[in-house]
Image: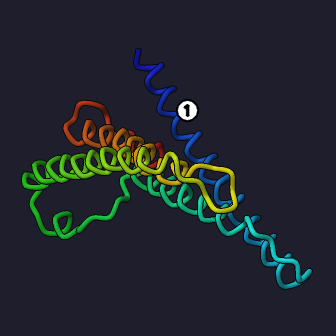
Amino acid sequence: MRFSVSRAWTLLDTTLDVLTAVSFLVMALTLTLQIVARYVLNWPLAWPEEFSILFFAWSVWLGGAGGMREGRQIRIDVIDFYAPASVRRILEPALTILSLAFLALVVWYGVKVTESQSTAEYDILPVSRAVLYAVAPVMGSIMALYLLRILARQLGLVPDPGPEQQ
């Protein structure tokens, strides 16, 4: 059982890394194409702006999930420097639980917004705007999975792999 869970995490981590790189690359290439078409060829294209915004949003959330995976989410680290270990053992899981609650709201309302945008299409791209807004519930759920893994480590339910294995 443990081996399959470990493989599932590895697969999720690898997929996230590949999707982040591909998403960013597609966005960068699209913007480069638009710049060359507009300023070099004097032939502006209509679709790259909407296309690159879509990939930018996904790139940001994919990168955020990667940061969450490594425990690099935004936090105030005063506790790490000044609080005794006994206080940190209580506060760190509590703060992780608060982060999970926030992500639950992001996912919940992200689903509602995505549903409300399902009939709206981009002006130029033949794609529903729901594809853009789906990033919040999809990536919010993945971030929550990573936070649950962090919480399990904080509570001592699973071993901490150390920085070289994260």
Q: Nearer the viewer, residue 138 or 9?
A: 138
Residue name at image x 29 percent, y 49 percent: 103
**Extreme front residue here?**
119
Residue 150 % position (x, y): 30, 43
**In this picture, is 108 found above or below 41?**
above
Quadrant of the drawing holding the N terminus: top left
Residue 97 shown left or right of residue 115 in the figure: left
* Crowding near the residue tagged with mark 1, few <14, some 14–19, many ≥20 C-alpha atoms within 10 Å: few
| Number of numbered discs overlaid on the protein picture | 1
Residue at disc 1, secondary structure: helix
Residue assigned mark 1: 11
Q: Quadrant of residue 64?
A: bottom left
Q: Is residue 1 above or below residue 21?
A: above
Which picture quadrant has residue 160? top left
Front-lying residue, 130 or 149: 130
Please give the name of the residue rendered at 51% of the width and 26% of the height, measured from the top-left corner.
7
Q: Residue 54 at x, y = what percent?
A: 59, 59
Q: Amino acid at mark 1?
A: Leu
Residue 69 visible (yes or no): no
Residue at horizontal 64 percent and vertical 50 percent from the top: 127
Residue 139: horizontal and vertical position, in percent? 44, 47
Residue found 78% across the figure and 73% down from its top: 34
Residue 90 position, x and y percent, is 10, 49
Residue 39 seen in the current view: yes
The relative height of residue 73 versus residue 19 in the rendered view (above or below) is: below
Give the left or right position of residue 70, taking residue 105 as reference: right
Asked whether, in this view, residue 38 is left or right of residue 14, the answer is: right
Can you say which quadrant of the picture contains the C terminus? top left
